[in-house]
């Protein structure tokens, strides 16, 4: 119950813990104003948002070893190691996306309007995702999720005159509004069952054992509808391939990692905090296991049939959600550590793969696999990095994706869910097929007669290298990042 | 007969179900947005009722107020998207919007 006398009102000490978010929201406002004052010169908002994202990134990295969680803004937001981990992830995503969009035809090409506002929206969405990863209250959970959702509907429809972009935005909005409405209904029932809005209050009420398991299961399913939509979990994934295909490619790249990681962060915060004491009192592990198997199988089998590279990557990102869900099974500390580590690696490699599509799209004007023939020789640097991302996505050593998958499977084996691990491994084999289909097109298929080089701007090569080098390094030297992920989880595990 | 918590919950659930039904059956984009409003308000009735009968504090009312504001923001963005759809496709019928491959 909210008590006005003991209410922790926002103050300056709060602001000091909240710097990355304030920087991103400030960058949003400054970029909008700067866009108008500078008479629509897009480099002004570009520079403001890039500066903001780099500042937020450095603050996040500096805050990685926060030990005691700080509850701020009326106990609605908590800043701890996990917050810093996700701040770092989102700020990095924003930096790379902003750098990349600058040379992207779909955002900056001739005839595009209001280019500056695109960067402003990226700043807003990054700030929203950061708050998502650190909310500890149903109100903040819902508000931050809607902030990210509303911004993303606008970004999906960025190319106003384009039929495909408008359709992507419409589908995103209809599915999003419906699933977040279902989630809100679930939240209202949780509030009624436990009489509390804070995650800790809900946890205390559930531990007391007064809540009927069937009611708890119903409510969990309702809430999973909203969060599952954000992470594109089957059966709430229908929007993903269409939205990724229709929206501008830099936006699709951003969607495929940012909101997804934010959704996982919120799932960890919400489900781990509230359900962990009662996890074996209802069918949570079985439910998550089934969802995980369905998600990875549907994702992988659908990806096999696709000929559009953006759609292949869309379905592959659904499959990766399935792998991630495996470690969510028992809500254990090791599982969450594996999820955090994999999310970081996944962000690097999936963002990189999407950025490759953006890079070649500028001069190729196509996303079809058939048109990718011989690209390995037509744009060598970008293609080599794409191969790194593809191998890493498949999960073969010595790339970072292998280490990430290893930890996920290790958690499943530790909990003795052997059949789940076997299904996961079989799915990885299927994924090898379609990733290598892209690789084959790049290097083994003959380019059409007279096809010239596909130039990729130096800025985009640089942004891709920002992702490719860590993907390689983390494959052989994953210790430091694993340590960071472990410490981040240790803070929330010590509840 | 006194009106108690079950009555409010019934209304909330009915609004929610009607909203879901509207979103499942209607093919007009504006009607879909109306369905969203029904879903959100179904949850709102629940929040306020629980605040009155279970919690006794202002948390539920606070949430309902935020949801009302958010519903307005969602409608603004939604209508803008429907407008863009009408300009590009010449219709607000969602079944005609299928350029992207299944």
Image (cartoon, rainbow, N blue to C red):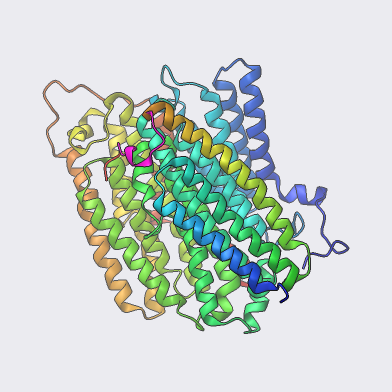
Seen in the picture, residue B69 relative to A275 is either above or below; the reply is above
What residue is at 78 percent from the left and 70 percent from the top?
Answer: B56
Asked whether residue A370 is in view, the answer is: yes
Is residue A316 rendered to the left or right of residue A154?
A: left
Number of marks: 0
| Any part of residue A159 in sight | no
* Picture residue at 61% right of the left edge, 55% below the top: B41
Q: Residue at x 62, y 78 (%)?
A: A206
Residue A259 as seen in the image, left or right of residue A127: left
Left or right placement of residue A219 versus residue A250 in this view: right
Q: As displayed, is residue A319 above or below residue A203?
A: above
User: Is A235 situated above or below A388?
Assistant: below
Residue A477, horizontal then vertical, whole percent = 43, 56
Q: Position of residue B76 (x, y in %)?
A: 58, 37
In the image, is residue B96 part of the stretch drawn in magenta?
A: yes
Magenta stretch encompasses residue A270: no
Q: Quadrant of the N terminus of chain A?
A: bottom right
Can you give x and y, in whole percent of width and height, for residue A433 in the image?
A: 20, 53
* Along the line of sight, the residue nearer the viewer: B90 or A33: B90
**Which of the pair A440/A231 is nearer the observer?**
A231
Instruction: Give the image location of residue A127, x and y in percent.
Output: 61, 44
Q: Main secondary structure of the magenta part?
A: loop
Q: Nearer the viewer, residue A297 or B96?
A: B96
Q: Which residues are magenta?
A: B90-99
Which residue in the rendered view is the most extreme toward the front?
A: B1
**Rendered-image quadrant of the C terminus of chain A:** bottom right
Image quadrant where residue A138 sits = bottom right
């Amino acid at each position: 119950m909210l008590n006005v006398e003991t209410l922790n009102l926002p103050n300056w000490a709060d602001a000091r813990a909240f710097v990355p978010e304030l920087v991103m929201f400030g960058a949003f406002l400054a970029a909008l104003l700067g866009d108008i004052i500078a008479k629509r010169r897009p480099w002004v908002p570009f520079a403001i948002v890039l500066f903001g994202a780099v500042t937020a990134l450095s603050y996040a990295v500096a805050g990685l070893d926060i030990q005691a969680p700080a509850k701020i803004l009326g106990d609605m937001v908590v800043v701890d190691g996990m917050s810093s981990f996700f701040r770092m992830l989102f700020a990095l995503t924003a930096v790379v996306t902003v750098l990349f969009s600058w040379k992207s035809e779909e955002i900056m090409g001739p005839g595009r309007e209001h280019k500056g506002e695109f960067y402003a929206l990226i700043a807003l969405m990054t700030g929203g995702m950061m708050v998502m990863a650190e909310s500890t209250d149903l109100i903040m959970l819902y508000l931050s999720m809607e902030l990210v959702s509303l911004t993303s509907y606008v970004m999906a429809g960025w190319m106003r005159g384009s039929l495909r972009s408008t359709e992507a935005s419409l589908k995103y909005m209809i599915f999003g509004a419906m699933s977040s409405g279902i989630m809100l209904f679930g939240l209202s029932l949780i509030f009624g069952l436990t009489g509390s809005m804070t995650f800790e209050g809900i946890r205390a009420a559930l531990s007391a054992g007064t809540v009927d398991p069937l009611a708890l299961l119903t409510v969990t399913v309702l809430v999973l509808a909203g969060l599952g939509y954000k992470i594109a979990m089957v059966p709430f994934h229908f929007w993903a391939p269409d939205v990724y295909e229709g929206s501008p490619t830099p936006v699709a790249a951003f969607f495929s990692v940012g909101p997804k990681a934010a959704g996982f962060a919120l799932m960890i915060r919400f489900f781990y905090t509230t359900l962990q004491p009662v996890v074996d009192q209802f069918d949570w592990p079985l439910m998550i296991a089934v969802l995980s198997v369905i998600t990875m199988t549907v994702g992988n089998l659908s990806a096999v049939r696709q000929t559009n590279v953006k759609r292949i990557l869309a379905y592959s990102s659904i499959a990766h959600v399935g792998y991630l869900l495996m470690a969510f099974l028992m809500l254990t500390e090791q599982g969450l550590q594996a999820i955090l580590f994999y999310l970081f690696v996944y962000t690097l490699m999936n963002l990189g793969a999407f950025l490759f599509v953006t890079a070649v799209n500028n001069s190729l004007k196509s996303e079809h696999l058939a048109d990718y023939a011989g690209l390995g020789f037509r744009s060598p640097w970008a293609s080599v990095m794409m191969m790194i991302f593809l191998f890493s996505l498949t999960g073969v050593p010595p790339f970072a994706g292998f280490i990430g998958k290893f930890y996920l499977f290790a958690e499943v084996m530790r909990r003795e869910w052997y059949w789940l691990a076997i299904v996961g491994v079989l799915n990885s084999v299927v994924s090898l097929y379609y990733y290598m289909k892209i690789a084959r097109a790049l290097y083994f298929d003959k380019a059409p007669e007279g096809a010239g080089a596909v130039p990729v701007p130096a800025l985009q090569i640089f942004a891709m290298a920002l992702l490719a080098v860590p993907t390689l390094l983390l494959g052989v030297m994953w210790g430091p990042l694993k340590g960071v992920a472990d410490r981040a989880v240790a803070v929330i595990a010590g509840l | 007969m006194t009106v108690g918590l079950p009555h409010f919950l019934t209304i909330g659930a009915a609004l929610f179900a009607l909203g879901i039904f509207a979103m499942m059956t209607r093919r007009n984009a504006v009607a879909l947005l109306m369905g969203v409003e029904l879903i959100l308000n179904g949850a709102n009735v629940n929040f306020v009722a629980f605040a009155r009968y279970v919690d006794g504090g202002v948390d539920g009312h606070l949430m309902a107020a935020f949801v009302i504001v958010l519903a307005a923001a969602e409608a603004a963005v939604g209508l803008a998207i429907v407008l863009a759809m009408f300009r590009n496709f010449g219709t607000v019928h969602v079944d005609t919007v299928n350029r992207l491959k299944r």
